Amino acid sequence: MTPSLVLMDYVDRKTLNNEQIEYLEQVLKASIQKLKFTGIEPVIANNEICDAALMSQGSYEISCIASILDVLQPTEKTMGRKKKVFNALCNAGLIVTD
């Protein structure tokens, strides 16, 4: 199982099973930590994944994962997954805001 394969399954079915959701949760956590400690630019998702995640084409795969998880399994925390990823990308200097 790879993140891209799971995301493409979501593109095809618009849903994921519990094992796939948990896998993406773990991938997301690991990706955020990797970004925080290395600042290495994440993988860009393909356009089909971006569209299914309701993200602009050319978005990072980590952003698409967060968006899909927020749809499939919303969190009750004050900071959603997409916001956590956005903050991590900003802190790594990969997104510049005014």
Image (cartoon, rainbow, N blue to C red):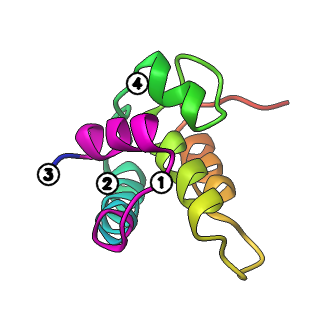
Is 9 a magenta residue?
yes
The amino acid marked with disc number 2 is: Lys
Residue situated furthest front in the rendering: 13
The first of marks 4 and 2 along the sequence is 2
Q: Regarding mark 3 in the picture, which secondary structure is present there?
A: loop
Mark 4–mark 3 Cα distance, whole angstroms, equals: 18 Å
The amino acid marked with disc number 1 is: Thr
Q: Regarding mark 1 in the picture, which secondary structure is present there?
A: loop
Q: Which residue is mark 4?
A: 44
Q: Nearer the viewer, residue 91 or 2?
A: 2
Q: Quadrant of the C terminus?
A: top right
Q: Which residue is mark 2?
A: 34
Q: Nearer the viewer, residue 53 or 40?
A: 53
**What is the quadrant of residue 70 in the picture?**
bottom right
Q: Which residue is mark 3?
A: 1
The stretch in magenta equals 3-21
Mark 4–mark 2 Cα distance, whole angstroms, equals: 15 Å
Task: Nearest to the eye among marks 1 and 4: give it.
Answer: 1
Vertical side of 1 occupied by 5: above or below? above
The amino acid marked with disc number 4 is: Ile
Mark 2–mark 1 Cα distance, whole angstroms, equals: 27 Å
